[in-house]
Amino acid sequence: MKPKAVIPVDLFGQCAGYEKIIPIAKKYGLFVIEDAAQGFGGSINGKMARSFGDISITSFFPAKPLGCYGDGGAVFTDNDDMFQLMSSIRVHGKGTMKYDNVRVGLNSRLDTIQAAILLPKLHAFISSELELRNKWADRYNDLLKNKVKTPSVPEGYVSSWAQYTILLDDSEQREHIQKNLKSKGIPTNVYYTKPLHLQTVYLPLGYPKGSLPFSEEASERVLSLPMHPYMAEEMVTEICTALLAEL
């Protein structure tokens, strides 16, 4: 099996390490599909997420940094041929006219109402929300540093903080903390409970438990705390106080 493409995934608001990925992809002639669904708004040395791959994608699912009120997404490219191909696939595989389908396509048009929601949200995201997400992430770090393993952002990177995710000791501690925070009305989540290589659909590829130990360990230790631009100082303090009381 000869690889044809690589799909780097931005995670928790931070871009993947494209300064290392892109040279390898070029060396081996690999097409780069940039999954910027969680990285929208992030950047590396001033270059924005969605601008590293041959094509890039984002999601407008409500949990993402720029979300609508339902399902939606977008594909980005500066390749004219790829743009024409994506435009065709988006509308049933149409050709030069609406009712002549030249390939098998999809119905992937963004609903007008979702587009109407996204326009003002995009303005808010650019003008204030990205800055506010970073403000609350910094506040979390101030209150939790040296108590739990907090997320860090490499030099030159900007995160859009799709999630604020900490590392705990193990799954037992995580379950205990989640249960007690929930009893106090504080929601948390785990992204993600099962690594990709252990998903049932990929088991035939032959990567059993133990094949990717760092991914497996992280899946048992990560915990995401509430994160959105419209938090308040009292809210962040309450969450951190409740969390630290359970350690």
Image: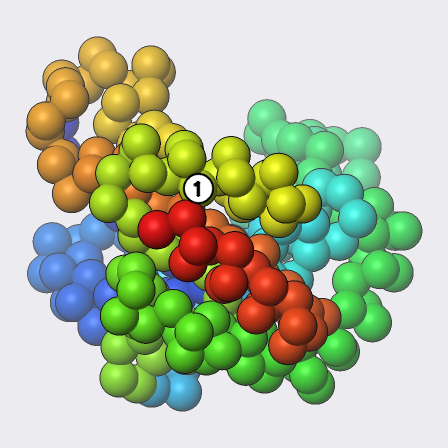
**Residue at 30% in and 52% down:** 167
**Label 1 sits on what residue type?**
Ile
Query: Which x, y percent locates residue 8?
Result: 31, 52
Q: Is residue 243 above or below residue 179?
A: below
Res 83 → quadrant: bottom right
Image quarter (top left, top right, bottom left or bottom right) of the N terminus: top left
Q: Is residue 80 above or below residue 223?
A: below
Q: How many marks?
A: 1
Q: Is residue 34 above or below residue 191?
A: below
Task: Answer yes or no: is residue 35 visible.
Answer: no
Res 107 → quadrant: top right
Q: What residue did someone put label 1 on?
A: 177
Q: Nearer the viewer, residue 118 or 170?
A: 170
215 with respect to 86 (left or right)? left
**Residue at 55% in and 75% down:** 136
Query: Which x, y percent locates residue 204?
Result: 21, 12
Task: Answer yes or no: is residue 64 visible.
Answer: yes
Query: Which x, y percent locates residue 234?
Result: 66, 72
**Residue at 52% in and 55% down:** 242
Q: Residue furthest front?
A: 245
Res 198 → quadrant: top left
Secondary structure under tag 1 reads helix
Visual colour scheme: rainbow
Query: Which x, y percent locates residue 152?
Result: 30, 71
75 with respect to 229 (left or right)? left
**Residue at 13% in and 35% down:** 212
Q: Local crowd at mark 1 within 10 Å, few (<14), some, or many (≥20)? A: many
